[in-house]
Amino acid sequence: MEYRRLGNSGLEVSAVGLGANNFGARIDVKQSALVIDQALDIGINLIDTSNSYGPMLSEEYIGKALKGKRSEAVIATKVASAMGTGPNQKGTSRAHILYEVEKSLQRLQTDYIDVFYLHRPDPSTPIAETLRALDDLIHQGKVRYIGCSGFSAWAICEAIWQSKTLNVHAFSAAMFHHSVMTRDPERVSFCNAYNVGIVPFYALENGFLTGKYRRGQPIPDGTRFGKSDVSWMNSSRTRTLTDTNFDVLENLEGFAEERGKKVGDLALAWLLANRNVSSVLAGATKPEQVVDNAAACEWKLTQDDMAEIENIFSASRQ
């Protein structure tokens, strides 16, 4: 397994991380433990979750699976999502952050969180208040490093500037949707320039870049796009399963097959070709999927490879 620095921090994380949004949502506590054990066995140390995943079971399952081996894992979790319907039960206010971090620590059965992300922007709370609260948690030893998720480039920039002005700890990492099919050059450029670690999510486009969805064929049962009761998943499915995207997928599959690889390997290897990508998150419901995801570290794309992939992508957008 390859390890990389998490942005400007001193923390080393596996180039491929384990996304834990399936824990409690699609697999039970026993299966989640099998997936985590496999990840640790092959050197994946980054486990990414949220207080809202599961719903609200993912952290609990991780805590149980890591009992007695906490030091082997780098746990990243998040705060900001709605945890109830009442006031002060969502967002990034000092009150909500300080309350929810204690709940996360209890569920994870640990006394510290390695990376604590703001799950999404909160326009109702001044970023200065949020950063001061996070800085307090770092000084208390409850959090080691902080990051943001889903922030625009300008919002990351604003937070970094405020951190310098307030003389508090700044974001070490930024999570956002970025893949070989969904490019985000503005955020990538900012993070590269300011050494903020990039942690892409939806690297496999909800499984589309594994080839499990085929043009003109029914959506397989048990897949994320097979769900019909989640509104945001329905819209994501509509955006993804287009003829244009299938054209890209089929061409990328051909590129990978010519080199004896799978298209999923290509999706992760393309992201890892950027040295400022600290870790690529890939979910799994089975131990064998963890092994397949980790294999992406072994494929080092050349400049010619990257140029050919760019031609495939560009041709589809003409």
Image (cartoon, helix red, strand yellow):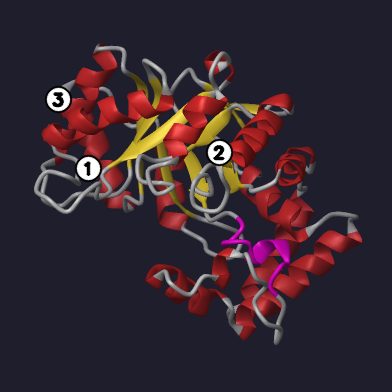
Q: Secondary structure at mark 3?
A: helix
Using the image, tell me which numbered label, if any, was put on residue 166. Answer: 3
**Cα distance in 3D space between marks 2 and 3:** 42 Å
Name the residue: 64% across, 43% down: 272
- Identity of the residue drawn at 58% across and 54% down: 203
Q: Position of residue 197 (x, y in %)?
A: 47, 35
Disc number placed over residue 21 in the picture, else none? none
The residue that label 1 is drawn on is 158
- Tell me the amino acid under the disc marked 2: Val
- Answer whether residue 212 is magenta in the image: yes
Please tell me which residue is depicted at 67% across the width and 49% down the height of the picture.
268
Q: Magenta stretch: residue 196 in it? A: no
Q: Which mark is residue 29?
A: 2
Closer to the camera: disc 2 or disc 3?
A: 2
Q: N-terminal of the two: label 1 or label 3?
A: 1
- 165 or 97, which lies in front? 97
How busy is the neighbourhood of tag 2: few (under 14 within 10 Å), some, or many (20 plus)?
A: some
**In front of the other: 46 or 223:** 223
Residue 81 at x, y = what percent?
28, 48
User: In the figure, residue 247 lies in which quadrant?
Assistant: bottom right
